[in-house]
Image (cartoon, rainbow, N blue to C red):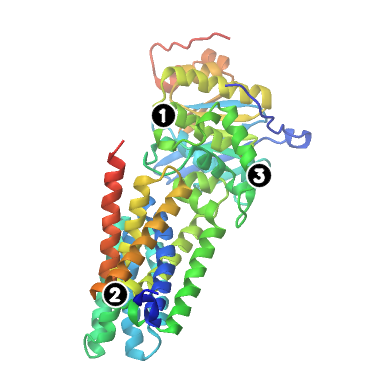
């Protein structure tokens, strides 16, 4: 058995990585197609404020991150739908607002500690058994929702107005998607860190959109690309002793570049 | 374009009700009325062409009728039910104005797009089943695009895409089909096919059609009823009466107005 599988912490890292490698690109395909890629990055920064709040008050960081990210998700969606701001401006306000709040809270808590850094850049190798259960549970919620509402999500992604006329509850689904993004971000945060979370959501989706000829295969390719990046990244981080989050995202980008070459050939 | 589908006919009970009933509908602020006191009844089996100059409120009228926009005043009934409580969306097919303006890179096959027209029929939380697939394939056969079902939607010509979007609207087997400027960007041959498809749906299946267009001459030739809109409803009646009354010329303030007739 390879050395990597002999350590419990590496097995937990792989399990967490495979779960996030499944849900992040699934959500990512919908986001990229609706030109909402930035929403993942925004909610990741909002979630960081939740982590800082949790560290300050002593609650579990994942709980704090999820609570604040969900509030942020509802806020972002309301501001976006109100039409009073350009969509991206609403996102930019929440992104910098979340980061500002996080910095203030971190300062109140005595400055940047090891804990804060582990959320900024990810610390997949210190995933505790209890963390793993949280990750698997949240992951199943996201995945289950997408499977259950697959046809509605396709309809609003392809043509929101036509979906509305078919009686699809577009506004509720838009809010739900944003909530799913918030949940995904909180799960991904543990693995690749706040700063690289949106990479795992967006890059495999972008790779898939270059290659896929239909929607089902777009989702499938995105998940496969992300899983490959996660496994390669974690294995490299173990043997080369480099940061797992960075290695995973670098692998995803290499796959994206390779897909460009694949498309260029006839 | 060989028809092979039997679309549901209006039942006798439904036949007595107007399919669409607008009463004194206005939209927009008092100073800037986009629609002003429009009353319009569309009966089962009508083929209504809505014409008017740019900015006359044609698209707004469709969107208000479908409940996408809330009117400032007035009442809207679909199949005898108030639009605010209307839930039987499967009875209505809609081809939006900018349907073909989607991103050509969107990864969707023709069949995926068409079956999405049954999202409202299948019900939330239910997966598409064999009936949905059959209905989508029949709709594709009706518009003559069955052979293209596996193709990426972005790789089709504008005319072919337009037929796919009509198939999506037909997939729920609607009794009322609304089309907003459907021939924009479609070449002449494809337009000819498109209108023969509409004639077919209207005559063979009794589908009620509402067609918004700026192309007056073609619409006057194809439709059985004309509504001339310029924020207010200037005229509603047969194309022949529209010509006789001078409503068309008045609508466009045109000196000469040639409408070809080959009926």
Q: Nearer the viewer, mark 2 or mark 3?
A: 2
User: In this view of the protein, can residue B182 be seen by the observer?
Assistant: no
Please name the residue that numbered disc 2 is placed on.
Answer: A238
**For the point 47% across and 43% down, which residue is it?**
B27
Between B99 and B113, the one lying in front of the other is B113
Q: Nearer the viewer, mark 3 or mark 1?
A: 3
Q: In this view, does B36 lie to the left or right of A94?
A: right
Q: Quadrant of residue B200?
A: top right
Residue B84 in the image, given as x and y percentages of width and height: 60, 51
Quote the CA–CA distance across marks 3 and 1.
29 Å
Q: Residues within 10 Å of mark 1 (few under 14, many from 20)?
A: some
Q: Residues within 10 Å of mark 2 (few under 14, many from 20)?
A: some
Q: Quadrant of residue B12?
A: top right
Quote the CA–CA distance across marks 2 and 3.
48 Å
Element on which disc 3 rests: helix
Please name the residue that numbered disc 1 is placed on.
Answer: B158
């Amino acid at each position: 058995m390879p050395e990597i599988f002999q350590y419990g912490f590496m097995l937990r890292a792989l399990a967490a990585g495979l779960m996030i490698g499944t849900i992040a690109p699934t959500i990512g395909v919908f986001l990229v197609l609706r030109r909402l890629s930035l929403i993942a990055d925004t909610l990741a920064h909002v979630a960081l404020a939740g982590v800082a709040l949790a560290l300050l008050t002593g609650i579990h960081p994942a709980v704090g991150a999820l609570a604040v990210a969900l509030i942020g998700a509802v806020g972002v969606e309301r501001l976006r739908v109100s039409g009073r701001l350009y969509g991206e401006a609403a996102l930019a306000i929440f992104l910098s607002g979340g980061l500002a709040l996080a910095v203030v809270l971190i300062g109140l808590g005595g400055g940047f500690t090891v804990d804060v850094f582990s959320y900024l850049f990810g610390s997949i190798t210190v995933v505790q058994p209890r963390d793993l259960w949280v990750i698997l549970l949240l992951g199943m919620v996201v995945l289950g929702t997408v499977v259950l509402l697959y046809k509605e999500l396709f309809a609003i992604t392809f043509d929101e107005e036509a979906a509305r006329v078919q009686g699809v509850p577009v506004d509720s689904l838009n809010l739900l998607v944003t909530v799913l993004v918030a949940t995904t971000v909180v799960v991904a945060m543990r693995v690749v860190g706040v700063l690289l979370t949106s990479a795992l959501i967006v890059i495999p989706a972008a790779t898939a959109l270059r290659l896929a000829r239909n929607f089902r295969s777009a989702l499938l390719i995105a998940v496969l690309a992300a899983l490959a990046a996660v496994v390669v990244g974690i294995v490299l981080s173990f043997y080369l002793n480099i940061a797992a989050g960075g290695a995973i995202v670098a692998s995803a980008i290499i796959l994206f570049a390779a897909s460009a070459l694949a498309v260029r050939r006839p | 374009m060989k028809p092979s589908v039997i679309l549901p006919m209006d039942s006798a009970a439904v036949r007595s009700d107007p399919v669409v009933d607008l009463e004194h509908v206005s939209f927009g602020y008092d100073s800037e009325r986009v629609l002003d006191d429009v009353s319009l009844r569309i009966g089962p089996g009508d083929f209504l062409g809505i014409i008017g100059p740019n900015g006359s409120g044609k698209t707004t009228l469709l969107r208000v009728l479908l409940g996408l926009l809330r009117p400032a005043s007035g009442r809207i009934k679909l199949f005898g039910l108030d639009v605010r409580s209307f839930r039987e969306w499967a009875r209505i097919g809609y081809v939006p104005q900018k349907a073909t303006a989607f991103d050509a890179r969107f990864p969707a096959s023709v069949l995926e797009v068409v079956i999405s027209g049954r999202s409202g029929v299948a019900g939330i939380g239910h997966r598409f089943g064999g009936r949905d697939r059959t209905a989508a394939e029949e709709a594709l056969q009706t518009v003559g695009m069955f052979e293209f079902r596996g193709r990426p939607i972005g790789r089709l010509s504008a005319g072919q895409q337009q037929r796919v979007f009509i198939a999506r609207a037909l997939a729920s087997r609607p009794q009322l089909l609304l089309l907003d400027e459907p021939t924009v960007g479609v070449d002449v041959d494809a337009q000819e096919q498109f209108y023969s498809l509409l004639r077919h749906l209207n005559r063979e299946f009794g589908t009620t059609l509402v067609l918004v267009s700026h192309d007056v001459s073609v619409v006057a030739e194809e439709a059985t009823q004309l509504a001339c809109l310029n924020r207010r409803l200037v005229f509603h009646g047969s194309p022949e009466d529209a010509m006789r009354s001078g409503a068309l010329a008045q609508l466009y303030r045109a000196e000469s107005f040639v409408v070809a007739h080959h009926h």
